[in-house]
Amino acid sequence: MTPMRDFKPFTEVHKLDWEALVRNIRRQGTPSRVFNIELFQDWEIEEAVDQRYGVTRGLDRSAPDFGWKRSIAMQRFLGYEWVGTSVGGLDTGEGLKAEDTTEAGQKRGERKWIHEDKGLITNWEELEKYPWPKVGEADTRALEWFEKHLPDDMCIVARQGHFCEYLCWLMGYETLCIALHEDRPLLAEITKRVVEREEAWLKVMLQSKRVKITWASDDLGFKTQLLFSPKDMREFVLPGHKRLAAMSHAAGHPYILHACGCRAAILEDLIEDVKLDGIHSWEDTIEKITDAKVAYGHRLSLLGGLDLDFLIRADEERIRSRVRETVKTCQPGGGFCLGTGNTVANYIPLDNYLAMLDEGRKL
């Protein structure tokens, strides 16, 4: 693919408009242009964009607020109406490491992932020794900075809501599966403590007048099924999302969810019980976003959509054609934002990612 040297800042092509983005997520009519969304872009991708186009030229990289200024500059350049932040999280341990083998040109030193077999909490004694942050303890530095410096055409997205993931990360997936059969009270207590903190963190976020969307991130399954049974999801995972969704709705904001894996077994729960406004993360081998639009796009916003494997392997014309096809099917009536099926991972060729954005701008 020919490098896209003439890729312009989004604000030279369209106006940013967070209010129109929110209306689109609420499915309040077909928007006048395509909106973009991503859970996040890997640092290496953003650095490649910066090196090519000079997005942060003029910013002092040694300044303590450089990262926040960089986030605003990068989001505006690429065409996103918001910046995401959170005020709290849980320690999940060191994890495992391996060499990063990407060939896309945005290589990092190593990749990390969570222990599958054993986490920091495998029994009641470890539960009590774990360094639980105090309920209400929050790091509001980023939130407060963005409140003061974010341009008026952008908003803040509250990034909270890891219930299934925290169970897997804190316990280890194998330990979690055993506990589902041998020590459900331990799972219930961990869940209780996670929910208490997620609620407290979101309460802090929702006090900000610049927060307009809550975006939970909670991977729920494999390619073929949930990580554990629908019944157990309804007991240990969905109540947390239902609570955060109710808090977000009470504040007048939509609640959207990034959830990898096959969600079919609890889709009705997510729509009818949790009252989800939008769903993110798509993989062609599980379900194409265009099929989902036909099946239930009138009940739920569908966000992202271009399968990562396709985006990595396809040439420019196939990518542009796929964007046109997706927009044609998913844009009518609102409730669609263009993006990858997962995240802008560092192993996506930069020009493939930019071709997706560029075609969306043209539409």
Image: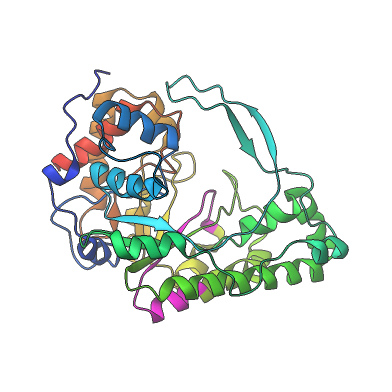
Frontmost residue, 354 versus 313: 354
Quadrant assignment, res 57: top left
Task: Count up the numbered dots.
Answer: 0
In this rendering, does residue 6 appear at all?
yes
Task: Tell whether 208 sits left or right of 240.
Answer: left
The scheme the figure's colours follow is: rainbow
Instruction: Residue at 53%, 76% (x, y): give it.
Output: 243
Task: Tell whether 120 sits left or right of 106.
Answer: right
Q: Which x, y percent locates residue 189?
A: 75, 71
Q: Which x, y percent locates residue 173?
A: 73, 50
Magenta highlight on residue 252: yes
In this rendering, does residue 273 appear at all?
no
Residue range in magenta is 244-264
The correct choice, above or below, for 14 with respect to 246 in the image is above
Quadrant assignment, res 340: top left
Quadrant assignment for the C terminus: top left
Quadrant assignment for the N terminus: top left
Q: Farthest residue in the bottom direction?
A: 250
Instruction: Residue at 24%, 30% (x, y): give it.
Output: 53
Task: Tell whether 262 sits left or right of 23.
Answer: right
Q: Which x, y percent locates residue 38?
A: 37, 47
Frontmost residue, 285 versus 172: 172
Q: Which x, y percent locates residue 306?
A: 36, 40
Task: Tell whether 360 sits left or right of 265.
Answer: left
Instruction: Residue at 74%, 62% (x, y): give it.
Output: 131
Instruction: Residue at 39%, 50% (x, y): give it.
Output: 65
Magenta highlight on residue 232: no
